[in-house]
Every structure is written in structure tokens, then in C-alpha cells.
């Protein structure tokens, strides 16, 4: 794999946490890391300059949505996703599997792939592992994901096992089809909320020898203690010298707990989605800035925060923007929420260096920011 490698720098003495460095064709990423989500080749309410200002090292885009519009061939014609969206740092594209199974109005799962309808116009489409590899290679992200079947929660054991086994067969087909030397392909561990299936899947995906390994099908409605139980079950069976990516997870408590359980990479739309509704994440808990209590509050979103929003604007002003339905309100809260999450990851990495990650968790709990 050209220009891609992972260094495991340190393992935490207190927990399963790991400190690493991920080398990609478009730059290096310290891990554990949080990746802002740019589903449709844009992180909502953020310009690439904004993302660099908060020092986002890598962002995520979505294969399903980019296939639907503008189309992967257009992106290829533009020179690839980096050129198309004006972002010269690393990008990860997921396979679109979750969207095919959750957003589509209708889908029919077969051994060769999935027939589904577009959420935009109802048109029929068919994704196979080979088709997904064609799309992701055209997009040209630094990291691509295999096409998988994500069993919903809850699901019966028999169906969950069948979906897991199909995921394994599709992973092998993806690996056979993937030829792009400057793009890393990650396999995905499935198995629902059944520890024996999760362990079987972790072992099977590890044996396929992907560049990295993702954990899918968690944070799909199950209680968080079950998610943590699944992470603990598979941790001993995940390759030690390869990056581990927990898909679709990124609230402050999950960033901490996932890191404790050996996760290296996270992504989540939470930070941007709640910002558009006026909700800010802080080290002291959530703040709904549209509330009346902030109408005459001339302090920043979070005291001591160094983000652009907190250094220049007040809660009262941002509340005014939200009430007036001005786009700037969502933009400022998005900047803050993403900045806060990236700074939390810096704290986590420093705590791993100093073997005090469990103490960091307790500090966040005591302060009220843990359950954001």
C-alpha cells in the first residue's frame, strides 16, 4: 500500500487505550482521532478553511450520497474527491452500506448485492461489492470501506449471523476488486449484539489482512453498555498493529469510553446535526442556546474555549441568530462543537501518554460534560 502505514506508539497502562500515528497520502493523523462528517463532500456549515482553523486532520464522506448526486463519474472527472471539494488533507469514504439498508425506501438483499430505491427520486439501483469498489476508487479517498450488511437493532440471532457471514463474503469480493494503490481498504466487523458472533467476525476479518479494521453495526439504538460490552469482547481479537475504526460513534462519553477500549478512529454527525438546532456541546454539559435564559447572556458558549465562535461572539448574539433563522448561528455552534470534540481527542491522547485516561474520564464525569 503506497504511502499508508500505522505506527502503534504506546499502549495505556491503565486500560486498552492506544496512541498511534496514521500515515496517509494526504498527511499524518494522530490517533485516537475524531473525524468530522462531510456526507455530501461538505461538512455542513463549514468551509475547508474553517476545518483547517480547528485543525481537523481527516474528514469522512459518504459513498451512497455521492453516488446519488453528483455521481462518482463526475467526481472522477473533477480529479477526485480532494480536488472536487477543495480539501487537501485525508478523507475516508464509507461504503454506503448503512444508508442502503436504512435510508432506502425499499431494498432486496441477495447474495450478489442489494437492490434499493433512491431516497431522492425513488429510482432503482443495485449495489454489489464490486460496484461499491468502483465508486470508492473513483472518489479517490485515502481510506475506503468494504461493502457490508448492517443488521438493525434488535435482530434475531439467525438473521444477524447470516448478515455477518454475507459481510465476510462481500469483504473478500471487495478485496479482490480493489486495485487502487494509493487507497487503503478497511474490512468491517459485524455480528450485532452477540458476543460470539462479534468475536467470530473480528477473527475472520483479521485473517483477511486488510490495511485497517472497522467496527460496524454499533450505536444503532442499543444501550451504550451493550456497545461497550461488544468492544471489550472483540478487542483481544483485533490486530494490534492495524488501525481500529468505530463507525458512527462520537459523543464525548463514547469518545472516552471507546478510546479506553482500544479504538483509534471515530466519526459522528452529532456535532453538526445538533448545532443546526441550537445545541452546543461543552466541557460542562449541553447548552440549548435558543433558550430564553441566554437572551441577555453576554458570555461565550463556553468559558475558556479558544474556538472562533467563543473568542468573538456571545450566547445572546448566537441565540438571536438562531431565533432569526440566520445561517451564521448554525455555523458558529458547529465550529464550537467540532473544536470541542477535537480538543477532547487531544486531551485523550495526552492522557494516554501520561497513563491517566481513567482519571480524565472521572474529571469529565465530575464536571458534567461526560454525558453530552
Image: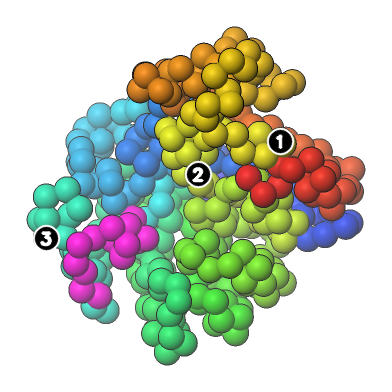
- Where is residue 71? Give x, y as percent: 20, 42
Nearest the viewer among 99 and 326 is 326
Q: Residue tagged by mark 2?
A: 270
For this view, does 159 lie left or right of residue 233? left
Find disc 1 in the rendering and name its residue: 283
Q: Residues within 10 Å of mark 3 (few under 14, many from 20)?
A: few
Q: Secondary structure at mark 2?
A: helix
Q: Nearer the viewer, residue 22 or 257?
A: 257
Task: Say if the magenta span includes residue 106.
Answer: yes
Residue that label 3 marks: 124
Q: Earlier in the sequence, mark 1 or mark 3?
A: 3
Q: Residue furthest bottom?
A: 158
| Horizontal relation, residue 51 to residue 123: left or right | right
Q: Disc 1 vs disc 3: Cβ atoms closer than 8 Å?
A: no
Please say whether residue 263 is one of the residues in the magenta stretch.
no
Left or right of 283 on screen, residue 94: left
Q: Quadrant of residue 169?
A: bottom left
In percent of width and height, residue 264 lies at 65, 51
CA neighbours of label 2 inside 10 A, class few (<14), some (14 to 19), many (20+): some
- The Cα atoms of the two marked residues, 2 and 3, are separated by 30 Å
Residue 22 in picture, x, y percent from top left? 63, 43
Amino acid at each position: 500500500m503506497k504511502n499508508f502505514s500505522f505506527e502503534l506508539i504506546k499502549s495505556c497502562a491503565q486500560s486498552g487505550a492506544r496512541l498511534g500515528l496514521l500515515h496517509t497520502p494526504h498527511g499524518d493523523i494522530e490517533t485516537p482521532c475524531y473525524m468530522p462528517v462531510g456526507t455530501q463532500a461538505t461538512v455542513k456549515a463549514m468551509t475547508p478553511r474553517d476545518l483547517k482553523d480547528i485543525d481537523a486532520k481527516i474528514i469522512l464522506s459518504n459513498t451512497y450520497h455521492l453516488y446519488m448526486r453528483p455521481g462518482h463519474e463526475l467526481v472522477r472527472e473533477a480529479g477526485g474527491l480532494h480536488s472536487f471539494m477543495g480539501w487537501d488533507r485525508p478523507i475516508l469514504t464509507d461504503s454506503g452500506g448503512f444508508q442502503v439498508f436504512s435510508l432506502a425506501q425499499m431494498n432486496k438483499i441477495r447474495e450478489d448485492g442489494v437492490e434499493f430505491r433512491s431516497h431522492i427520486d425513488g429510482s432503482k439501483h443495485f449495489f454489489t461489492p464490486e460496484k461499491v469498489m468502483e465508486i470508492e476508487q473513483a472518489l479517490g479517498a485515502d481510506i475506503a470501506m468494504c461493502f457490508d450488511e448492517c443488521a438493525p437493532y434488535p435482530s434475531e440471532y439467525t438473521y444477524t449471523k447470516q448478515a455477518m457471514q454475507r459481510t465476510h463474503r462481500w469483504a473478500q469480493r471487495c478485496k479482490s476488486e480493489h486495485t487502487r494503490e494509493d487507497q487503503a481498504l478497511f474490512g468491517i466487523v459485524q455480528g450485532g449484539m452477540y458476543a460470539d458472533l462479534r468475536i467470530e467476525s473480528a477473527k475472520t476479518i483479521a485473517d483477511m489482512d486488510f490495511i485497517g479494521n472497522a467496527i460496524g453495526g454499533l450505536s444503532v439504538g442499543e444501550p451504550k453498555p451493550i456497545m461497550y460490552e461488544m468492544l471489550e469482547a472483540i478487542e483481544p481479537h483485533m490486530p494490534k498493529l492495524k488501525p481500529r475504526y468505530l463507525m458512527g460513534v462520537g459523543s464525548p462519553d463514547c469518545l472516552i469510553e471507546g478510546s479506553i477500549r482500544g479504538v483509534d478512529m471515530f466519526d459522528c454527525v452529532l456535532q453538526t446535526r445538533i448545532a443546526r438546532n441550537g445545541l452546543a456541546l461543552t466541557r460542562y454539559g449541553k447548552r440549548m442556546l435558543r433558550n430564553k435564559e441566554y437572551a441577555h447572556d453576554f458570555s461565550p458558549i463556553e468559558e475558556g474555549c479558544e474556538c472562533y465562535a467563543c473568542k468573538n461572539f456571545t450566547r445572546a448574539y448566537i441565540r438571536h441568530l438562531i431565533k432569526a433563522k440566520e445561517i451564521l448561528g448554525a455555523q458558529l455552534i458547529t465550529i464550537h462543537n467540532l473544536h470541542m470534540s477535537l480538543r477532547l481527542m487531544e486531551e485523550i491522547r495526552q492522557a494516554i501518554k501520561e497513563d491517566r485516561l481513567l482519571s480524565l474520564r472521572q474529571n469529565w464525569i465530575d464536571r458534567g460534560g461526560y454525558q453530552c
